[in-house]
Amino acid sequence: MRTSAGKSGKLRVGFVSSASYTTLPEAIRAFRKQWPRVELLLNPLTSGEQIEQLLDGVLDLGLLRDPGEIPGLKVDLVSTEDLVAVLPEAHPLALRESVRPADLQGEPMILFPYRLMPGFVARVLRLFDGLEAAPQVVQRAIHQETVLGLVAAGLGVSILPESVQRFQMPGLVCRPIAGNPQTALYAARGAKQALVIDQFMEYLRPHRKLHG
């Protein structure tokens, strides 16, 4: 990779689906304007998949959700957003202005597979700490759009980042969660040092949006 001297080469970036319609588009536009000779290889991957590829050197940079500390990787906050309850439009809770975690006890829930999105799934399940029961996970889906479709079909409820409301999918509604729990998007990189990686990180930071 000859990126540090000649602004050419390749940059391999992984990203979770929510980053593709929030943080990533503006960063890509700014990066390509400044680094037109760098081939930008974009890979939609879950957080778990990205961690493995970052540690193996397959990816140069990753956008992960709620990863926590990862030995061997440098992790920087990019943005935060509120979590929302995603409900079938005919669900009784859909009539409320907001939903408490206690309201979702015993509800059939659709989540991501833990091994592919461990930090985010753990973040969701922590909402139910101290309650008598957690939701019953009845279905796991890899893609956020699939989760939304299954909720719209009435198979269960879910908890997702508030940016999913941009989809406006028929058959479902999103409601704030009491206490405004949040989820965070992070940029992660391995041991490789390159100016092009540093620069892409800089294009991510101006789009940071912190709530609360």
Image: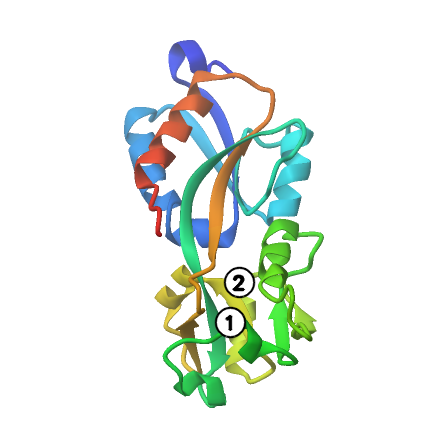
Residue 71 drawn at (x, y percent) = 67, 30
Q: With 100 as the anchor, is 24 left or right in this view? A: left
Q: With 10 as the anchor, is 23 left or right in this view? A: left
Residue 116 drawn at (x, y percent) = 67, 52
Q: Nearer the viewer, residue 5 or 202?
A: 202
Q: Residue at x 68, y 60 (%)?
A: 113
Q: On residue 148, which mark appears? A: 1
Residue type for callout 1: Leu
Q: Is residue 22 visible?
A: yes
Tell me the SS state at disc 2: helix
Give how far apart the Cα atoms at labels 2 and 1 are.
6 Å
Q: On residue 176, which mark appears? A: none
Q: Nearer the viewer, residue 14 or 178?
A: 178
Q: Is residue 150 visible?
A: no
Location of residue 195 with respect to 23 vertically, above or below? above
Q: Are marks 2 and 1 in contact (CB under 8 Å)?
A: yes
Residue sitting at the far front: 130
Residue named by callout 2 = 144
